[in-house]
Amino acid sequence: MGVATADAFYSAIAAFGLTLIADILISLQTPIRLIGGLFLLYLGIRTLVSVPADDAARAEGRGFLGMYGSALALTATNPMTILAFAGIFVGSGLMMDGGTSTPLESLVIVAGVFGGSLLWWLFLSGGVSLLRERFTAGMLRWVNRISGGIIIAFALVTLYGLVAG
């Protein structure tokens, strides 16, 4: 839900031609990328060293709001999302200011982005949930290590892009 909300927010900015907000977000991309890169680094290290939880601990978890907030924050700190949506909308001529879409068409597109993103992430998380029972604690530990390493690599690429860029 968090990722789908952020995707819908950024697609709304692109679809409704809210160039002022888009320009502000783009002008703030350096601090947003820094925060996003540091958050990814934290998340990667935490994942790398985490011990797989047993079923009782998994049931307690952070709850819906905690997971929603984390996914929303992680996706919202990626300024490339708005650039991708802006490129899609500009290329298709669907932006309201200077484009051909009406407010209703833009709203339908934003709803479609939200629905599509939500279905995609439900499919992925549902698939993982179905396969979870087949993994042993040792296998999950390796999944955590590999996932943590990949997340750390993305964080380092993001942070390096700030220094080199």
Image (cartoon, rainbow, N blue to C red):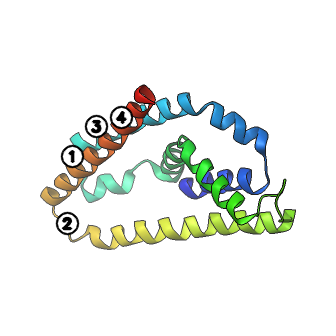
Tag 1 residue? 51
- Under circle 4, the secondary element is helix
- Under circle 3, the secondary element is helix
Spatial separation of the CA atoms under disc 1 and disc 4: 16 Å
Tag 4 residue? 42
Residue count near mark 1 (Cα–Cα under 10 Å), binned few <14, some 14–19, many ≥20 = some
Q: Label 2 is placed on what type of residue?
A: Phe
From this view, report whether residue 112 is shown above or below residue 73. Answer: below
Q: What x and y, as percent, mark residue 62?
A: 43, 47
Discs 2/3, front: 3
Residue displayed at 64% across by 60% down: 88
Tag 3 residue? 45
Give the mark, 2 or 3, whose residue is nearer the N terminus.
Answer: 3
- Under circle 1, the secondary element is loop
Q: Are marks 4 and 3 in contact (CB under 8 Å)?
A: yes
Residue displayed at 33% across by 73% down: 130
Q: Are marks 1 and 4 in contact (CB under 8 Å)?
A: no
Spatial separation of the CA atoms under disc 2 and disc 4: 25 Å
Give the mark, 1 or 3, whose residue is nearer the N terminus.
Answer: 3
Discs 1/4, front: 4
The front one of 18 and 100 is 100
Q: Are marks 2 and 3 in contact (CB under 8 Å)?
A: no
Would residue 156 be seen by someone viewing this image from the given angle? yes
Please give the label number shown on residue 135: 2
Spatial separation of the CA atoms under disc 1 and disc 3: 12 Å
Quarter of the figure with residue 21: top right
